[in-house]
Amino acid sequence: MASTAAELVKPPPGYPSTTVVLRECEAKLLSFVFHEYGKGVTFYERVKKGMTRCDAIAMKTCREIEGNFCEYISTQFEKPVLYTGPVISEPKKEPLEEHGLPNWLEKFEPGSVVFCAFGSQLILEKKQFEELVLGFELTELPFLLVVKPPEGTNSVEEALPEGFKERVQERGLILDCWVPQLEILRHKFSRRSLARGIQRKGSRKRIDS
């Protein structure tokens, strides 16, 4: 069983794609699946056991999007795969008032604000976080970044590079909490969704994007 990032990036025999593969930086983020998840069992073993012992496997996708990958899973586990989605709910109107987002967005030209959200499951290394925010600084564009505090820190505030806040000032807003992403993307001042959903687990992010 593969357990290192270098091993995980190697597609298994019969894998149906040479382009949709793990990169090493992504594989490192999956190391949690080999950690204990309950007494004497890892997360990987739980999932594998469930898929091995079940009668059928349900996937939240459709044949047109990921049919070849689901067929591969069906072959590997010798189980039928049931396509259950994507199920796209009606968009809800969610207020932007929290954190003063409307007032902050309206300080800038329409279509100028870059929005980047990594989701709640991804926690960056401190060095990755620093490189990310310094990259946004170099764009000289207004930006809204939603990201969890990096590893080994208690807040995004303490992880910011020295002098970053003074240089960026009100041009950048970094939050470590939930925000109404669809409402932000609909806002006339948002430039585009940049890196939205990178490393986020599940299919919902792909559909939203």
Image (cartoon, rainbow, N blue to C red):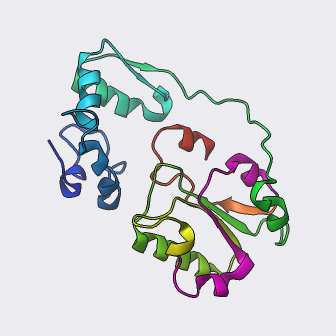
Closer-to-camera residue (133/22): 133
Q: Position of residue 198 (x, y in %)?
A: 49, 55
Q: Is residue 89 left or right of residue 157?
A: right
Image coordinates for residue 19, horizontal then vertical, percent:
35, 51
Q: Residue at x 44, y 58 (%)?
A: 123
Q: Position of residue 91 (x, y in %)?
A: 74, 36
The residue depicted at 36 percent of the width and 29 percent of the height is 70
* Position above or below: 111 against 51: below
Q: Position of residue 127 (x, y in %)?
A: 40, 74
Left or right: 180 as drawn, with respect to 116: right
Identity of the residue drawn at 50% across and 38% down: 203
Check if residue 178 falls in the magenta segment: yes
Span shown in magenta: 160-187
In this view of the protein, which residue sits in the foreground, 129 or 59?
Answer: 129
Residue 187 quadrant? bottom right
Residue 165 lies in the magenta-colored region: yes
> Which residue is pictured at 18% across the width and 34% down the height?
40
- Residue ranking furthest to the left: 1
Compared to residue 15, the image places residue 59 above or below, namely above
Look at the picture and state if 124 lies above or below 44. below
